[in-house]
């Protein structure tokens, strides 16, 4: 089945889905399903090529869902956000989606990137959600002390003191010709990551606009307040359904967090990347990550 990309109201909240293999209303009870929960920013276009590769390898349904407020619905949809959404709002949103669209006997494989891992951790506290989840792959997870990370120490004062000017500059940016905006973003991504795939540039164009950027900043501020000490009790309780994957040089989830996880839960399935992938793996390492995830899912389907 070809990719389907559309907007849906989830409890009156505008939500963008991208799916392969089965649309959200078409999933049959007992089927396998892969669900991506993104990091922040939570624009699903960043992950498009990764998820396409994953579906081609496994031939099971794949869904990606946007974070509330991180993408702008087309005017033709006549959908509107009501406020800025915090981390708890995003958690509740994903719980609602699973309850509404994922049958109880479905075998759900969650791919949780960055702060998506925190969302997944909180979802596991709900018995009916935990029942559906076969495995959650926590990729470059931010599940503890995000405010102490090198990247947060850099970004926090920038947003605190430069947040409004940055949002204003994004307004000016949107007034430029699209081809110029795309060229500028392509240059930024190429400089930062050594690659600028079209789907990543498209995601960047959607990100750099005032409302979206403001919502992304707001979510980050709530992450700082809510992602504190490692929730050892919850992770230990659900460790058989978790696999953690840490980067070797990750400014959002440094190796000291991997060491802390293993220290507190020695038998947790947690590994360190040996493939040189960055936190933003979907920009230049989508095929490599898709290969890893597909292998892990095949192993768990067989068990």
Image (spheres, rainbow, N blue to C red):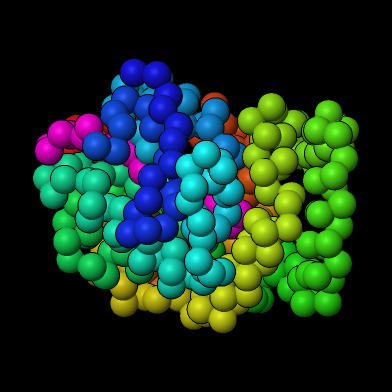
Describe residue 96's horizontal placement relative to residue 278 as left or right.
left
- For image coordinates 69% across by 28% down, the residue present is 197
When the figure is inspected, residue 276 is found, relative to residue 89, above or below; the finding is above
Numbered range of the magenta stretch: 26-44
- For image coordinates 67% across by 43% down, the residue present is 206
Q: Quadrant of the C terminus?
A: top left
- For image coordinates 35% across by 47% down, the residue present is 110
The part of the image, by quadrant, that contains residue 287 is top right
- For image coordinates 87% across by 52% down, the residue present is 172
> Where does the image place residue 189, in percent across and percent down from the top left?
78, 39
> Where does the image place residue 170, in percent across and percent down from the top left?
81, 54
Describe residue 39's horizontal placement relative to residue 230 as left or right.
right
The part of the image, by quadrant, that contains residue 84 is bottom right
When the figure is inspected, residue 130 is found, relative to residue 291, above or below; the finding is below
Front residue of 128 and 230: 128
Query: Is residue 275 covered in magenta?
Result: no
Q: Is residue 54 visible?
A: no
Q: Is residue 91 visible?
A: yes
Main SS, magenta residues = loop
Number of marks: 0
The part of the image, by quadrant, that contains residue 159 is bottom right
> Where does the image place residue 4, in percent across and percent down from the top left?
41, 27
Front residue of 231 and 82: 82
Describe residue 62's horizontal placement relative to residue 68 as left or right.
left
Front residue of 226 and 262: 226
């Amino acid at each position: 089945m070809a990719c389907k990309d559309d907007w849906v109201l989830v409890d009156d909240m505008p939500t963008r889905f991208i799916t392969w293999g089965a649309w959200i209303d078409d999933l049959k009870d007992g089927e396998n399903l892969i669900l991506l929960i993104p990091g922040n920013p939570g624009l699903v276009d960043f992950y498009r090529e990764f998820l396409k590769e994953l579906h081609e390898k496994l031939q099971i349904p794949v869904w990606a869902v946007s974070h509330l407020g991180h993408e702008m619905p087309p005017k033709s949809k006549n959908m509107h956000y009501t406020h800025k959404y915090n981390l708890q709002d995003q958690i509740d949103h994903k719980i609602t989606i699973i309850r509404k669209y994922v049958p109880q006997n479905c075998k759900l494989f969650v791919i949780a990137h960055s702060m998506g891992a925190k969302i997944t951790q909180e979802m596991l506290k709900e018995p009916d959600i935990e029942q559906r989840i076969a495995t959650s792959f926590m990729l470059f997870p931010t599940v503890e002390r995000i405010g102490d990370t090198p990247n947060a120490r850099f970004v926090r004062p920038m947003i605190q003191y430069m947040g409004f000017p940055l949002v204003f500059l994004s307004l000016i940016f949107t007034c430029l010709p699209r081809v110029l905006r795309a060229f500028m973003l392509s240059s930024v991504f190429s400089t930062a990551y050594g690659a600028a795939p079209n789907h990543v540039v498209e995601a960047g164009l959607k990100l750099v606009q005032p409302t979206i950027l403001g919502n992304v900043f707001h979510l980050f501020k709530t992450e700082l307040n809510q992602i504190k000490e490692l929730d050892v009790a919850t992770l230990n309780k659900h460790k058989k359904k978790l696999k953690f994957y840490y980067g070797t040089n990750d400014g959002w989830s440094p190796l000291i967090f991997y060491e802390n996880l293993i220290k507190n839960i020695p038998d947790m399935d947690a590994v360190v990347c040996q493939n040189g992938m960055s936190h933003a793996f979907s920009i230049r390492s989508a095929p490599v990550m898709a290969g890893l995830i597909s292998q892990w899912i095949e192993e768990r389907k067989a068990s």
